[in-house]
Amino acid sequence: MLRSRLPAFAAAGLLAVTLASCGTVQVPAGPEATDPVCADIILEAPPQVLGMDRTETSSQGTAAWGSGEDTVVMRCGVTPPGPTTDQCTTLEDGNGVQIDWIIRELEDGVFLYTSYGREPAIDITVPLSAAPDQPSGAALDLAQVVSRNIEATDHCVGPGDEPTS
């Protein structure tokens, strides 16, 4: 039986994202946030995601857009997921860039997108309130920066498919 490698405590930690009085989003860093590739990704991250402006974060390897409960958060250097029975899908942006994501719905209407087949791994938390019609829009907005900096070494497969790596 395949099992998810995304630790439950990491998902719970993402729900604890809060705003400090100075407006900085408090975000726990991923275990590999010091990877130089993460620095490039954070520096190249777009000024807007889902039409929301970028805001300051508290940790290395992180970026955020929006404010309050509508904040979208990206963390670079999270633990790469292994084989899982969680939903894994390929999202393609308007420029044809494809990224494979494991998608989990967390508590309180928050979606967690974790890149699959790329190291270091990226995760993006998207409150449904920030994108009620298409929470995947945040992952699509970040596809270019992920693709430019991290090569895919594996891809999502469905039941009965042979792995592509």
Image (tube, rainbow, N blue to C red):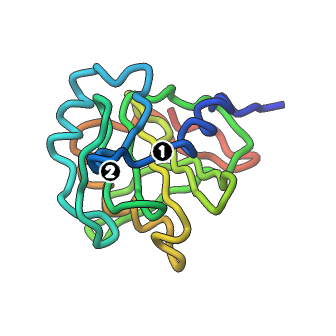
Residue at disc 2, secondary structure:
strand
Q: Position of residue 73 (x, y in %)?
A: 40, 49
Q: Residue at x 64, y 30 (%)?
A: 9
Left or right of 154? Residue 2 is: right
Left or right of 28? Residue 104 is: right
Amino acid under disc 1: Val
Q: Residue at x 69, y 53 (%)?
A: 107
Q: Position of residue 106 (x, y in %)?
A: 66, 51
The N terminus lies in quadrant: top right
Seen in the picture, residue 112 relative to 51 is either above or below; the reply is: above
Seen in the picture, residue 16 relative to 107 is either above or below; the reply is: above
Residue 17, numbered circle: 1
Q: Position of residue 58 (x, y in %)?
A: 31, 35
Residue at disc 1, secondary structure:
loop
Q: Position of residue 142 (x, y in %)?
A: 31, 55
Q: Quadrant of residue 148?
A: top left
* Residue pointed to by mark 2: 64
Amino acid under disc 2: Ala
